[in-house]
Amino acid sequence: MSVTLAIPSKGRMKEDAVASLARAGITVSAAADNRSYRTSVAGAEGLDVLLLSASEIARELRDGAIDFGITGEDLIRESAAEPGDIVEIVARLGFGRADVVVAVPDPWVDVETMEDLNDVAAEFRQRHGRRLRIATKYWRLTQGFFARRHGIQSYRIVESLGATEGAPAAGSADIVVDITSTGDTLRANHLRVLDDGIILRSEACLMRSLAGPADAGLAEAVAARFRAS
Amino acid sequence: MSRPGPVADAPAPSRPAGGPEAVLADFFARRGAVPLDAPMLQPAEPFLDAAGDALRRRIFLTKGDRGETLCLRPEFTIPVCLAHIAEAKSLPRAYGYRGLVFRQRSDEPAEFEQAGIEDFGDADTAGADARAIGGALEALAALGLDPAGLDLLVGDQNLFEALLEALDLPAGWQRRLLRSFGDEARLQATLTALAAGGAAGRRSRLDPEIAALAKPEARPALEAAIAARMEAAGLPPFSGRTPAEVAGRLIEKRLFAAAGLAPQALAILQDFLGLECPLSEAGRLLRAKADEAEIDLGRALALFEARNAALEAAGVDLAAIRYRAAFGRSLDYYTGVVFEARARGSVLPLAGGGRYDRLLMLLGAEAPIPAVGFSLWLDRIRQIVDPQEAAR
C-alpha cells in the first residue's frame, strides 16, 4: 500500500512545498525524466509525491484521487461548498500568503464598505438597465460572501480566467473579486479593497482528502509528521 | 433548520377522490385558470436576472450547443410570465401549472413536484390578493389536508414601505431597510447600524480633497474631481456608474451619517415590526398604532383592510390566519402581500405566494402588469396526506 501527496508542479509554490516537506524529513527530488509528474522520495516509506497544477490539486483532493496535497486554501475553498466535509487541513505551511478581496474602482469614492456596495448593487439595474457585474475566478467564494454573509443578492458574476484586475477598465465588469498578496497590482489598476472586503486570508496548506480510500495507518503516519513539525 | 415530520397527532385527513392530478385539474377549471405547460429546459438568464446571481448555487445549469446557458426549470412563475409575454394574450388572465421543478435543497430531494396559479392583470388588487390566498387554502383542502393542522401566515411589504415613507426617512435608508425586509436578523442589524449612525464612528479613509467637496454646495466641483479620477483610471465613459451618481450618493451618505436614525422613529419601527396577531385583529391594531405614532399609513392600510374584507366575503376565517408585520418571503421580486401555509410547527411551506407587480416588466412586458400567485409543494403535501404512498 502507498499514499499519494501532490505538490504544485512549478514556480515558487513548488520550491516552498519541497522545503516544507524537507523540514518534515521527506526529501523529494525530480525523477530522471524531467517531464515526468512523478518524483523520487526519500524519508517516508510508501509515500508517492506527484507534481500537479495548484488548481488540479484542489480538485483531486475533493474527488479523493490523491490522499494529500499542498495547495492554496483559496483553491480548496473554491472547489466545494462545504470544504470541511471533503478535506482536513493538516498544517498551515506559512508560505503562499494572499488575500481574496472585494475591490472597487478607486473613483467610487462613496463606496467604502460592503453595505455601501449593497446600496449600489440594489439600484444598479434601475439606473443602468443591467445588474452590477463582478469579474472573478472565485464564484463560489464570491457568492458565499455576498449572499450569505452580506445579504447582497443583486449582481452577476463574469467569469474571469486571467487579468481579472483589468476587467473594470476593459468594461467587462464593474468590480472584481481577486487574490492579492501586496495589493500592488490592484492599486496599479486604480482598484481599492473595501474596508470589510477581505473574503479569505489564504496560505498554502497541507490538506488530507477525506474522500479517498487511503491506507489509514500510513496516511496517519504522514499527517503526524506535519502536525509535530 | 430541522425537517418537520407530518403532524403527529392530527386526525387522519380525508383522502381526496381521484389522484392529485384530477383534483388539480378540477381546481384549475373551477378557478378559470388556463393550464399552461412550460418546457423543463429553460434559458437561465431570466432566472438569474430576476433573482440575482445568488440563485446560481441553487439551480441546475447546463450549456446549449451555441454556448447559451440553460437550466432545469427551478420554478414556474418566471416561465409562466415569459409564456404570457411571448403570446401577448389579453388580460386579465389566470394560468394553472403542475410539474417537476429542480432546486438544491438541504434535506429534501432536488427534484420535486409543484403546482399553482398565476393571476395577471386584475386591477382590483384586494380582490385578486384574496383570490390567491383563498385559492391556496382551497387547493390544500381539496388535496386532502386538514386546515386545523396548518399554520397560516400573512405579511405585507406595502405597509412597511408606507411606514418608512410616513416617517420621512432619507431615501437611501428607506431602500436599505426595505431590502432587508423579510430577513428578521438582517433587518434588526440594519436598524441597529442606522441608529448608531455617526456615533459608531468608523473612520473614513476618504481622500481629503474629495471629503472637502462632499457637500451639496460644492457638487459641481465634486463631480469634476470624480470624473477626472475616472478618466485617470481608464474607466469606460459610457458604461457603469457616472460621476454624478457617485457624487450624489457620497453627499447624501455624509449628510445623514452624522445624524443617525432618531430614537423616536426607531421605537415606532420596532413597535410595528413586533406586531403579530390574528389577521382578524390586525387592521384595528395597525390603526391604533398609527394613531398613537401620529402617522398616516394611507392607501397601504386601506388596501390591507379591503383585502381582509374580500377574504372574509370569500368565506376565509381571518381568525385562523396569523398576521406578522415582519414577515416577508425570501424572493426579492415580491411587492405586496405574501403568505405561506405550513404544517403546524414546521418552517417549510406547503403553499406560498404573494404579489409581484414589477416582475413582468422586468422580464420584458411593455407595460406594468399587476400579478399575484401561489405555489403548492406537492411532495410535502403528499408526505402528510399519504405517507405510505409518498415513501414508495
Image: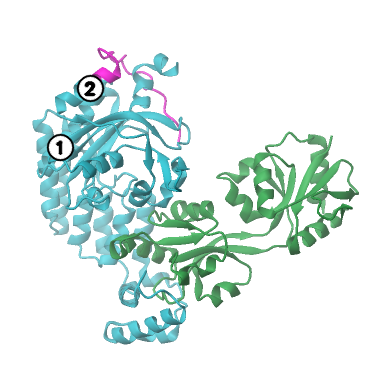
Chain colours: A green, B cyan
- Classify the position of the N terminus of chain A by image quarter: top right
Note whether A194 is above or below B162 in the view shown: below
Identified at 55% across, 76% down, the residue is A187
Note whether B37 is above or below A18 in the view shown: above
Decide whether the magenta segment is chiefly helix, strand or loop.
Answer: loop
Note whether B68 is above or below A200 in the view shown: above
**What is the x, y in percent for residue B155?**
24, 43
Front residue of this view, candidates B15 and B99: B99
Q: Chain of mark 1?
A: B
Q: Which mark is residue B25?
A: 2
In the picture, measured across the screen, residue B10 lies left or right of residue A224, that is left
What is the secondary structure assignment of the residue under circle 1? strand
Q: How far apart in space, not on screen, are marks 2 and 1 (Cα)?
A: 17 Å
Q: Residues within 10 Å of mark 1 (few under 14, many from 20)?
A: some
What is the secondary structure assignment of the residue under circle 2? helix
Q: Which residues are magenta?
A: B1-24
Front residue of this view, candidates B72 and B145: B72
* Residue B23 magenta: yes
* Residue A71 magenta: no
Choose top left, top right, bottom left or bottom right for residue B214.
bottom left
**What is the x, y in percent for residue B124?**
9, 43
What amino acid does circle 2 point to? Answer: Ala
Q: Chain of mark 2?
A: B
Q: Which mark is residue B116?
A: none
Write down the residue under mark 1: B93
Dot 2 or dot 1, earlier in sequence = 2
Choose top left, top right, bottom left or bottom right for residue A133.
bottom left
Dots 2, 1 in contact, CB < 8 A = no
- Classify the position of the C terminus of chain A by image quarter: bottom right
